[in-house]
Image (tube, grey):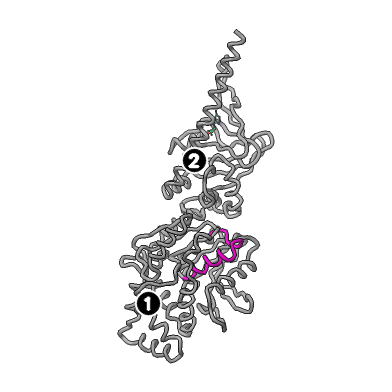
Amino acid sequence: MSTYVIDGQELHIRDNRRNAPVALLIHGWSSSWFTWTPLLQALGTRYSYMAVDLPGYGRSPAPKHPITIDWYADLMAKLIEEASDRPVVVLGHSMGGQIAMTLALRHPMLVERLILLNPVVSGRLSTFINLFVAPHILLERTRLGGKILSYLENTPLSYINQLMKPILFAERAAISQQDYDRIRADARRPGQGRVRAACYEAMKMGDLRGKLKQIQPPAQVIWGAEDNTVPLRDAGAVADEWPQADLRLIPNAGHWPHFEQYETTMRYIASFLGLPILPSLPNDQVQQQRDLDVGEIAQFLSNTELGQDLSESQRLRVAGLCHQHHFAPQDVLALEDSSGDELFIVQDGQVDVLVRISNELGIEESRRVNVLMAGQIAGEMALIQGKGGRRTADLRAGKSGATVLSIDSRYLFALFEDDASLGLKLMQNLARSLVQRLRVQNWQLQLAEQRAEVHR
Ligand SMILES: Nc1ncnc2c1ncn2[C@@H]1O[C@@H]2COP(=O)(O)O[C@H]2[C@H]1O
């Protein structure tokens, strides 16, 4: 844990303190950094994560002044400025999602991407919460009320437990007793009644309906389909007002999809952030990927054959899969007839395409048939043939070497499966590049024919 002091406010933060891009994680109402435990290991492969205890929750003391969502968002903005010299990825759960969106609206320059889990949008929680939980919250505002409640809670009836479970989790959700106990302990932590009551009001005041379409950074919104805390009508507002957001509903999950359906939630997040989704991939690839600036690669992709007509968030997803390699002049990227499981994008320098051809004496020689420049792709032919596809030519770095991005075909196919419309666009782009090359070859053949005609 680290402690920051921002504007006199003490903040306790669970972090892994790496020299890597920052991911800021903001928990929800009546919670703590613990919210993020299922995701920390995977996020830590690429990010220096900071799972904050918001003021008034976990180990961070409550402020003396009234709490608003704007205040939380501005405090998070100052924390980002303190911890990072570039925009960061922000994850928010529930009320933390409302804070994250407010942060992106008020400080768009600080947010590279948003991932929101069951975020509060309208601030109007479910009828269940409003009918059964709100009275407790109002009671808890006073010290005496808090005492009465904790007394009732410790009776054999333990009725608060009966109330909480169906509100928080789907009926068939997979959540361990241990995790449930910790989430419940956070929600009922003594001494936080005043902050819980203040936040209940702050969420209503922080209504984001009508503002969602102004959010600039690319966003993924994940929602447990059986959420009984933040109603799905808020997901409806996202669908209506914010079509750019990548909205995913997860069955058999309630308000805590990352605990209840970890694998599906993690797969969505991993593909949005370009984290390794295939645990079998060698570690060194993950290592290389950590140091790449995904934002810069995404920017570069917009001028490549593969990245044409993709939205910014789609380019970011593809960029997250790229590895960068530097090749000295004449170095081999791929050999004819070998099996190929990578797609290449020339980033800098040139790549020669060489095929083996038998000359008049029947001796095989290597002939250069093409030179690929920055932005062009190579290796698509083996990829399109699928498993066991063979390279149709040698690929070698040109005279002054080459910097090349590569994408493992397993990542790419996993992405196609996960996001069919992005997959279709990428396949169209691969096909377009092949069509263009065939056209050039037909034209070159015609030209050669015409020249031969003249000489006859
Ligand atoms: N005639 C050509 N013109 C341009 N590129 C080619 C040509 N023949 C092969 N290639 C590229 O060379 C790559 C070798 O690996 P692949 O067969 O996977 O994919 C091939 C194409 O990307």
Amino acid type at circle 1 is Asn
Residue at the location (61% across, 53% down)? 293
Nearer-the-camera pick, 384 or 286: 384
* Residue 147 on image: x %, y %: 42, 90
Marks 2 and 1, the one that precedes in the sequence: 1
Q: Residue furthest right?
A: 400
Determine which quarter of the picture holds residue 124. bottom left
Q: As rendered, which of 362 and 414 lies closer to the eye?
A: 414
The structure residue drawn at horizontal position 65% and vertical position 62%, both measured from the top left corner, is 85
Q: Secondary structure at mark 1?
A: helix
- SS at mark 2? loop
Residue 149 to residue 425: above or below: below
- Residue pointed to by mark 2: 341
Which of the pair 380/198 is nearer the observer?
198
The amino acid type of the residue labelled 2 equals Asp
How many badges with numbers are in the image? 2
| Quarter of the image that includes the C terminus | top right
